[in-house]
Image: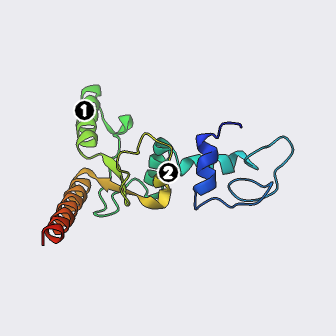
Amino acid sequence: MPAVTKSAALLAECSLVTRTPGGCAWCGKALPARRRTWCSDRCGEAFWKNHWWSLARRAAKRRDKYRCTKCGHVLPKRPARTAFRTESAYKKAMAAWRAARKAGRLEVNHIVAANGRHAQISCVHHVENLETLCIACHALHTAELRDRVKATKAERAAAAAG
């Protein structure tokens, strides 16, 4: 019996896949000659963009136009060399830009938690399950989630004891 690949297992359970016998695994169209899974490179890329964390993260940031979906925070623009008269003024502006960019970076959050599955190819990385957040909003979201988990555990313990 041939070994089942991770992508084949994912195709069998993924809710985004159109299942058509003998068709493209993503859109269901007929497969062109010499193609086995995807009818085009675009369908293969769409599948991986929704299942591979690094590609899904990039797609979510692009979809959200590189701004926080909660507060609207945007990264600062890189200074243009032509906007400065001297090289030292440009270098000073670049240093300030690098510092602001590091401090105000954007992160991608799983709406339904990934629970450590970032390194795995998984349906938890579907782009609809991702949102772009600034550091502050992501920390706030994580704290709220942590509080909810603690409250749920306390409720379960109280129900088991009483």
Q: Nearer the viewer, residue 110 or 5?
A: 5
Report the label total.
2
Give coordinates of residue 12: x percent, y percent.
Answer: 63, 54
The local secondary structure at tag 1 comes to helix
Front of the two marks 2 and 1:
2
- Residue 15 lies in quadrant: bottom right
Q: Give the left or right position of residue 51, taking residue 97 as reference.
A: right
Give coordinates of residue 132: x percent, y percent.
Answer: 37, 55
- Disc 2 packing (10 Å; few <14; some 14–19; many ≥20): some
Pick the quarter of the image with the N terminus.
Answer: top right
Q: In this picture, is 148 found above or below 44?
A: below
Q: Residue at x 27, y 29 (%)?
A: 91
Q: What amino acid type is highlighted by mark number 2?
A: Ala
Q: Earlier in the sequence, mark 2 or mark 1?
A: 2
Q: Residue at x 60, y 47 (%)?
A: 9
Residue of label 2: 59
Q: CA distance from mark 2 to mark 1?
A: 28 Å
Q: Residue at x 35, y 41 (%)?
A: 78
Pick the quarter of the image with the C terminus.
Answer: bottom left
**Residue 147 marker:** none
Give coordinates of residue 148: x percent, y percent.
Answer: 21, 64
Residue of label 1: 95
The local secondary structure at tag 2 comes to helix
